[in-house]
């Protein structure tokens, strides 16, 4: 196989790096793959340890120039590693993963132009499984990792297949050509600073015609969100992750007009991104506006004072220009720039109405046509079915 680069961001993940990096050197099909690590935060001696072992494991590491003051974020950290790589192929890898025997080669066998190939995760049974991974407990923490049992399990699992299956889905660790990544996609979107960056780029891969391949003979052991903080056993890290996830989810919805959608096997699902305007009357709270605003391109309001209060809250949480997005309803007749308009009355707005708003792109794609209609308490006017999701592919 060709030489590849493992790209690994880390945020004070020394405990996991101490098993992650040796596993690559021990279990990879090639012993000379590049390993590039980006240290985004260091509260546990990560840099000191990397300096000690850089020659032993033949690794390169780079440190956030604003270490301790500001995070790069995982997407930019990955892009930094990819930019520094000297190979034609890279693999996105998590600090809390352990590479299984020859998993790099098992993924590489499926790699070709316009494909993204991922290995299969084996995880302790902490989160539900829809069939996209394997739930088997070979240790909850690196110090408990049952290496011998893990290796034997992989061997026996592969032997049971006369022909090893693949499925259509995508999750780390994933592999692709660097040239396609940079020229077609342009990297991760920096507005998704610490979460949802993977779902965003998977949407963009799908829209530009990439094929997703998950091989079920190449495995990693995944300690399940320890690096990012989604594991709730680390309360301090998990609280910060929840804040980042809530912020990034709103940014994702603002960008795509929908929440994250995928099949049970993790193939992304996208819907058209329509230019939608909300005309909101009887909005009596900033919270109401905050709930609705991410789901549209423009908001027309009849409560000017609420607008300013909400902007004060939201401008610190979004990369979008809410001062332009949220407008006085009195100017609507002059502006009229949205292809689809939704009239909302806060005095009779229901949970069912909100559920319809969250599904609006799919509803319009399935049965929408030019004209006016009513859904529950929502009056919807479709002036055009033009959409612009393909404009979101390249950063």
Image (tube, helix red, strand yellow):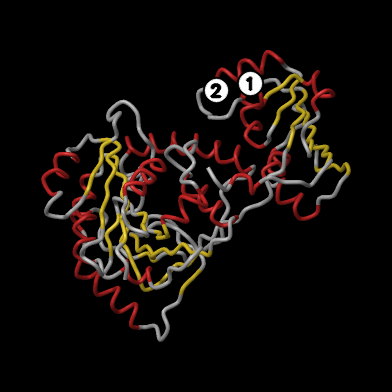
Question: Where 215 falls versus 292 (above or below)?
Answer: below
Residue 30 % position (x, y): 24, 67
Give the side of residue 253 with respect to residue 233, left or right.
Answer: right
Give the side of residue 385 with respect to residue 355, left or right.
Answer: right
Residue 203 % position (x, y): 56, 52
Residue tagged by mark 2? 315
User: Which circle marks residue 14 in the picture?
Assistant: none
The secondary element bearing badge 1 is classed as helix
Quarter of the view holding residue 33: bottom left
The secondary element bearing badge 2 is classed as loop
CA gap, disc 2 and disc 1: 9 Å
Question: Where 338 falls versus 282 (above or below)?
Answer: below
Position of the N terminus by quadrant = bottom left
Quarter of the view holding residue 223: bottom left
Residue tagged by mark 1? 323
Q: Dot 1, how many residues are within 10 Å of its Cα: few (below 14), some (14-19), or many (20+)?
A: few
Residue 343 % position (x, y): 80, 32
* Residue at x 32% of width, y 63% of height: 220
Earlier in the chain: of badge 2 and badge 1, it is 2
Question: Where 51 falls versus 301 (above or below)?
Answer: below
Question: Where 288 falls versus 218 (above or below)?
Answer: above
* Residue at x 20% of width, y 55% of height: 19
């Amino acid at each position: 196989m060709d030489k590849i680069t493992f790209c690994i961001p880390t945020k004070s993940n020394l405990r996991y790096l101490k098993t992650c990096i040796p596993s690559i050197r021990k279990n990879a099909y090639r012993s000379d793959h590049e390993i590039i690590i980006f240290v985004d935060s260091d509260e546990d001696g990560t840099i000191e340890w990397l300096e000690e072992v850089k020659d032993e494991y033949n690794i390169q590491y780079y440190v956030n120039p604003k270490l301790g003051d500001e995070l790069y974020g995982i997407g930019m950290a990955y892009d930094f590693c990819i930019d520094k790589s000297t190979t034609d192929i890279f693999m996105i890898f998590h600090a809390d993963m352990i590479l299984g025997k020859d998993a790099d080669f098992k993924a590489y066998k499926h790699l070709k132009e316009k494909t993204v190939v991922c290995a299969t995760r084996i995880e302790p049974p902490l989160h539900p499984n829809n069939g996209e991974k394997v739930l088997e407990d070979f240790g909850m923490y690196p110090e408990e990792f049952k290496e011998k049992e893990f290796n034997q399990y992989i061997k026996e699992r592969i032997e049971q297949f006369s022909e090893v299956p693949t499925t259509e889905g995508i999750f780390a660790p994933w592999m692709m050509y660097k040239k396609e990544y940079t020229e077609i996609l342009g990297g991760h979107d920096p507005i998704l600073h610490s979460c949802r960056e993977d779902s965003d780029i998977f949407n963009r891969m799908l829209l530009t015609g990439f094929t997703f391949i998950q091989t079920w003979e190449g495995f990693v052991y995944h300690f399940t969100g320890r690096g990012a903080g989604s594991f709730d056993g680390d309360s301090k890290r998990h609280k910060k992750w929840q804040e980042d996830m809530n912020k990034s989810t709103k940014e994702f919805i603002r960008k795509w007009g929908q929440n994250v959608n995928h099949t049970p096997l993790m193939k992304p699902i996208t819907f058209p991104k329509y230019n939608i305007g909300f005309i909101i009357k009887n909005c009596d709270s900033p919270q109401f506006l905050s709930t609705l605003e991410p789901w549209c391109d423009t908001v027309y309001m009849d409560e000017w004072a609420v607008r300013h209060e909400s902007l004060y809250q939201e401008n610190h949480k979004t990369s979008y220009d809410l001062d332009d997005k949220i407008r006085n309803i009195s100017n609507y007749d002059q502006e009229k720039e949205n292809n689809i308009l939704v009239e909302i009355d806060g005095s009779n707005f229901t949970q069912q109405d909100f559920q319809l708003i969250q599904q609006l792109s799919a509803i319009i794609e399935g049965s929408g046509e030019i004209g006016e209609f009513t859904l529950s308490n929502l009056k919807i006017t479709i002036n055009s079915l033009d959409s612009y999701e393909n404009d979101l592919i390249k950063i």
